[in-house]
């Protein structure tokens, strides 16, 4: 089994501003695993801050794992995690190994997992922008998913009146789209109580990460009086986090760049279901490669937010389709995606 690597600078069509800052693009690291006949591909896209230096470090760390021939995917995941490798790089290797397995078996990954295809449309995402930009951009974004669901980023540094203006601007132009809000931890407890009550009267279906990661004690108080379902994202990285906070959220947002790939993602969903929680899959700045991995397990989720590849100019990979707003995995073996030659 041989590993090889390639980094690609990807640029966003629309820069994405959230409560913590602005992202215009990212350095994405692609990992290839070959058995001599088939080659699996995975992608590390942890977002802003991951640069060529960190990509080179990740390549070295993955190479230093040594010969992984003969090890199961679960064993490789455990080995890479124990070595302290960043979860995004672990994800790239894990996804590449699953892709390779699918290619060896001649089956698409969703069938390897015993799943059907996803049936839930993806949200598209509008970042924190002035109301006039929101009104102009939302209809453009909604062309990508047949106008089915819009995630509105709030937690504006100018305060909750600016958040309200942004939400109302999006709602004016969102047509029939389902509306949901992600505060990315940008609210205080008092702001969150106020905003959730306000949003509950204005057609919002759920709120994601109202309080900053680390404020889970306060979250219990918010959960007790909530009028909308609360999903946790930044507070949840791996399956064990779900058990810690299951008594103070309605659902969890899994990302492959946080779990370290598909292996731990399957465990996280199982733990969430065991706690009677709802589930969502989200993304960072992935292209069609790691978004494709998410699409293959899309049937496991109540909500899907796999839109980052739709906002790349250009997407360096291909193999996914969008059908009536649903990001569909390929029927080719493995992930069924590949980097476009350039
Ligand atoms: Mg989120």
Image (spheres, rainbow, N blue to C red):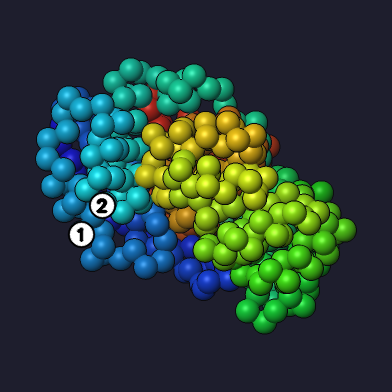
Measured from the top left, where is residue 157 in percent x and y?
63, 79
Asked if disc 1 and disc 2 are in contact, CB closer than 8 Å, the reply is: no
Task: Answer yes or no: disc 2 within 8 Å of ligand 1.
Answer: no
The residue pinned by badge 1 equals 56
Q: Is residue 324 above or below residue 258?
A: above
Is residue 197 shown to the viewer in this render? yes
Foreground residue among 192 and 165 = 192
Q: Which of 335 and 187 is in front in this view?
A: 187
Q: Is residue 42 left or right of residue 174?
A: left
Q: Is mark 2 on a helix, strand or loop?
A: loop
Q: Where residue 74 sits in the image (x, y, percent)?
A: 31, 31
Label 2: few (<14), some or many (≥20) within 10 Å? Answer: few
Residue in view at x 26 percent, y 26 percent:
72
Q: Which of marks 1 and 2 is nearer the N terminus?
A: 1
Q: Which of 80 and 153 is in front in this view?
A: 80
Residue pointed to by mark 2: 84
Image coords of residue 45 (percent x, y): 39, 54
Judged from the image, the quadrant occupied by ligand 1 is: bottom right
Q: Residue 82 carries which label?
A: none
Q: Is residue 147 visible?
A: no
Determine the CA span between mark 1 and mark 2.
15 Å
Q: Residue placed at 52% from the left, 63% from the top?
A: 214
Q: Residue at x 77, y 61 (%)?
A: 196
Total numbered labels placed on residues in the image: 2
Asked if 288 appears above or below 164 in the picture, the reply is: above
Q: In this view, does 52 lie to the left or right of 220?
A: left
Image point (52%, 47%), residue name: 244
Packing grade of label 1 (10 A; few <14, some 14-19, many >=20) is some
Q: Where is residue 107 in the image (x, y as percent from the top left)?
A: 40, 19
């Amino acid at each position: 089994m041989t590993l090889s690597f390639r980094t690609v600078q990807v640029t966003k069509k629309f820069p994405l501003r959230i409560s913590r800052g602005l992202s215009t693009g990212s350095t994405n690291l692609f990992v290839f695993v070959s058995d001599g006949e088939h080659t699996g591909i995975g992608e590390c896209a942890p977002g802003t801050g991951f640069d060529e230096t960190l990509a080179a470090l990740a390549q070295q760390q993955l190479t230093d794992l040594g010969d992984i021939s003969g090890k199961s995917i679960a064993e490789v995941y455990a080995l890479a995690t124990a070595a302290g490798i960043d979860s995004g790089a672990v994800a790239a290797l894990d996804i590449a190994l699953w892709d390779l397995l699918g290619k060896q078996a001649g089956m698409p990954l969703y069938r390897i997992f015993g799943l059907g295809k996803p049936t839930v449309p993806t949200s598209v995402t509008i970042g924190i922008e002035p109301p006039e930009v929101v009104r102009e951009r939302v209809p453009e974004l909604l062309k990508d998913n047949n106008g089915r669901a819009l995630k509105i980023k709030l937690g504006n540094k100018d305060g909750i009146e600016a958040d309200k203006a942004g939400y109302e601007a999006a709602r004016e132009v969102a047509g029939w789209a389902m509306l949901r809000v992600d505060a990315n931890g940008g609210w205080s407890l008092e702001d969150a109580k106020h905003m959730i009550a306000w949003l509950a009267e204005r057609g919002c279906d759920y709120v994601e990460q109202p309080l900053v990661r680390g404020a889970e004690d306060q979250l219990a108080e918010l959960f007790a009086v909530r009028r909308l379902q609360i999903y946790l994202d930044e507070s949840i990285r791996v399956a064990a986090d779900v058990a810690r906070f299951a008594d103070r959220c309605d659902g969890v947002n899994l990302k492959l760049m946080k779990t370290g790939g598909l292996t731990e993602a399957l465990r996280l969903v199982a733990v969430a279901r065991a706690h009677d929680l709802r589930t969502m899959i989200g993304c960072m700045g992935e292209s069609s490669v790691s978004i494709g991995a998410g699409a293959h397990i899309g049937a496991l989720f109540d909500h899907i937010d796999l839109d980052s590849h739709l906002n790349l100019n250009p997407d360096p990979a291909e193999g996914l389709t969008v059908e009536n707003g649903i990001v569909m995995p390929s029927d080719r073996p493995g992930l069924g995606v590949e980097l476009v030659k350039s």
